[in-house]
Image (spheres, rainbow, N blue to C red):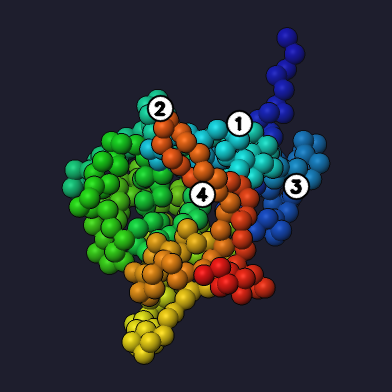
Amino acid sequence: MGRKSQAPQRREETVWALYDCLAERGQEKISIKEIAARAGLAPGVIHYYFKSKDDITSSLVKAIIEIYANGLHRKFTRGELAGILGGDLVKEFGYRLVCHDAEDFENLTHPGTTESGYDVEVNKLVTDSDLTVYVNTVVWRGFNGGWKSVCVGLGSYRSIRWHHTPDSMSMSMNKNRMHEMLDEMGSVIEQKIGKESIFKIETALANPLEVHKVWAGGVSETRREVLALIAVAGDPDIKDKLKKGCEAGGKTFIVSGGGIEFMRPWKEAVYGIPPEQVVGSSIKTKFEMRDGEPVLIRLPEMNFIDDKEGKPVGINFL
């Protein structure tokens, strides 16, 4: 019987050696020699299995599973994911791109219960993966972000039932009851897998065209940074000037390149400007009847870009 090939093991050791190196610094600063040392192999062995460092990186990417965190909502079809994320991304990841399924009990795990008695149940990928990178593209006041991303987007009814109630759900920036519960749940997850096992990318004022600001780091730390920015946006001096302008007979409008679906829900709460006085970019929609109910369907196409020369055009729509 011939000797069993060591190729699969050597390739895997090399890929995860690169992963360990990337945790310390950027790819451009990492050499094949360093990867080899981390893997316990000679550089020549690395070159035998991989053509270049980019070849190792490509193999590492293939070890990544992308999961769409849709909470209790139904799973998206491949076509719908292509419309949301882009066809190229869906094609590249293939069936390594999946949707969270809150009713797929075999792929859920219960890492524990909080001190207040709240159950924590999330997708197994959260606890079984070496690293979970969560990208959050929506922050509405104090409602989104933080541990809501993981514990709701990748959670189940068993967990979500505790905080998704009329008494708990809140847009509050301070002493938010819902997020106090979610922070407890997040602590249980961190105790189970370690704080470094979840990396959060948080955004503010994100829309299909641009992102105003991005933070990366721990779940709680990035949420604090986002809330600090939004608090500045609602500065009392600005609101006072707007109020005085209205009292003097003026009418204030917000004209931005941001998406109107994103801006209209919270501009009135922050600035006192009603939704009909907010002008922004928009996505094409179409009207359909589904199961006897009228619905508006968002299409993967821009309807109007409220930027540069588009701003006066947008104002003229009013």
Q: Could you say which disc has been placed on residue 54 in the image?
A: 3
Residue 263 on image: x %, y %: 46, 64
Q: CA distance from mark 3 to mark 4?
A: 21 Å
Residue mark closest to the camera, 3 vs 4: 4
Residue found 72% across the figure and 28% down from its top: 7
| Camera sees residue 185 | yes
Instruction: Give the mark, 1 or 4, whose residue is nearer the N terminus.
Output: 1
- The amino acid sitting under disc 4 is Val
Q: Residues within 10 Å of mark 1 (few under 14, many from 20)?
A: few
* CB-based contact (under 8 Å), mark 2 and mark 1: no
Q: Residue at x 39, y 73 (%)?
A: 273
Q: CA distance from mark 3 to mark 2?
A: 36 Å
Residue drawn at (55%, 45%) of the image: 286
Which residue is the site of mark 4? 133
C-alpha gap between disc 2 and disc 4: 22 Å
The residue labelled by disc 1 is 95
Q: Report how far apart the C-alphas of labels 1 and 4 lie in the structure.
A: 18 Å
- Mark 4: secondary structure: strand
Q: CA distance from mark 3 to mark 1?
A: 22 Å
Sooner in the amino-acid sequence: mark 3 or mark 4? 3
Q: Secondary structure at mark 1?
A: helix
Q: Secondary structure at mark 3?
A: helix
Q: CA distance from mark 2 to mark 1?
A: 17 Å
Give 70 or 54, whichever is nearer the viewer. 70
Kindly check if marks 2 and 4 are in contact, taking CB atoms under 8 A apart as contact.
no
Upstream in sequence: badge 3 or badge 2? 3
Percent x, y of residue 97? 58, 36
Q: Of the residues tagged 3 and 1, which is closer to the observer?
A: 1
